[in-house]
Amino acid sequence: MNKIIRKQQFSEKVFCLEVEAPLIARSCRPGNFIIVRVDNHSERVPYTIAKSDPVKGTLTMVIQEVGRSSTKLCQLNEGDEIVDIVGPLGTPSHIENYGTIICAGGGIGIAAILPILTALKQAGNRVISVLAGRTKELVIMVDDVKKYSDEVIIMTDDGSYGEKGVITVGVEKVIQREHVDKVLAIGPPIMMKFTSLLAKKYGIPNDVSLNTIMVDGTGMCGACRLTIGGKTRFVCIDGPEFDGDLVDWDEMFKRMGTFKDIETSPNPSEGG
Ligand code: FES
C-alpha cells in the first residue's frame, strides 16, 4: 500500500499527488514511469513521475481526470492509500549535452518533461522550455520548470497566460531565432505529432514520449505495441521515448481510440 501524503489541486480536473513509494523513489531515473492500480477493482494505468524524493521516499505524480480510474485516484485524499504502484518502468531518457534543446511540454505533459529537462540542464544543455495549455490553469509547474530552464516561453490557446497560440508557434519562433540541436516534446499525441513534424521540417532531431494504453507494462501483453521506423516496438519497455520522425502517428491515434469507450464506460463490467 502507498500512502498519499500530499494532495494539491492544479485545476478543475488536474491534481498533484505525493505518495510514499520509497523503493521506486530511490531507483527511478528521468523518463521512467509507473503503473498504478488505485484499488482491487481498478485497471492498471500508467502515470509519469513528475518528481522523486529519495530521502523522503516519495513520488509526485500529476493526474488528469479522463476516465474512471483516474477519477477514482483524484478523489483520494491525504492519508488514503493506493493499493499498488509498480515501477520504475520503461527505458530512461538518454541524457547528454546536445547543446541547445527545446523542451516542449503540453498540459500534464509538463509534469512528465520536468525531470527530463532537469537532467538535461544538469548535463550542460541550454534548455529552452516551451509550455502550453488551453488556458492559464492548464499550464502547470511553471516555477519548477523555470528553475532548470535558460528561458521559458508560455503559450495558451486563449491568450490568458503568456502568448496566444499553440505550442508549435512558440517552438518555431525559437527555431527561427537561433540554432537548435534537439527538440523534445511531451503532451497530447496531436501536440507531439505537430511538434515533431515542425522539427523535422527544419531537420532537427526530435524525440517524443508516447502515452499509449498499457496493461502489464513489462512487454508481455502487447497492449502498447506500435510501429516505429517500420518495426514493432513496445512502448512500455522500448520507450516511452522514441525518435518522433519514426512514429506511425496514424496507428498511434487509432490505438489510443481503441480503448476510449471502455475507459469512459459507467459500467464496471465493461472494463477498467
Ligand atoms: Fe503490455 Fe506494453 S503494456 S506489452
Image (tube, rainbow, N blue to C red):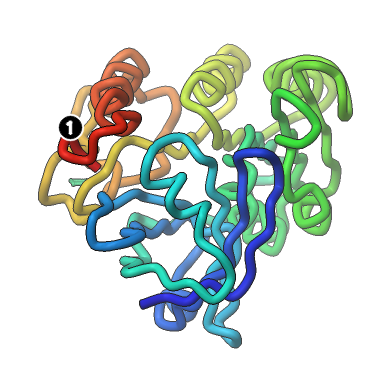
Q: Secondary structure at mark 1?
A: strand
Tell me if I can see residue 93 in this picture: no
How dense is the environment of label 1, judged by Cα within 10 Å: few (below 14), some, or many (20 and up)?
few
Residue at x-position 52% and y-position 28%: 188
Asked whether, in this view, residue 22 is left or right of residue 106, the answer is: left
Name the quadrant of the N terminus: bottom left
- Where does residue 148 sit, x and y in percent of width and height? 77, 56
Nearest the viewer among 123 and 262 is: 262
- Where does residue 100 sit, x and y in percent of width and height? 72, 41
CB at mark 1 closer than 8 A to ligand 1? no
- Amino acid type, label 1: Thr
Asked whether, in this view, residue 79 is left or right of residue 169, the answer is: left
Nearest the viewer among 172 and 165 is: 165
- Where does residue 76 sit, x and y in percent of width and height? 50, 61
**Residue 63 vertical position relative to residue 122 in the rendered view, above or below:** above
Residue at x-position 40% and y-position 82%: 23
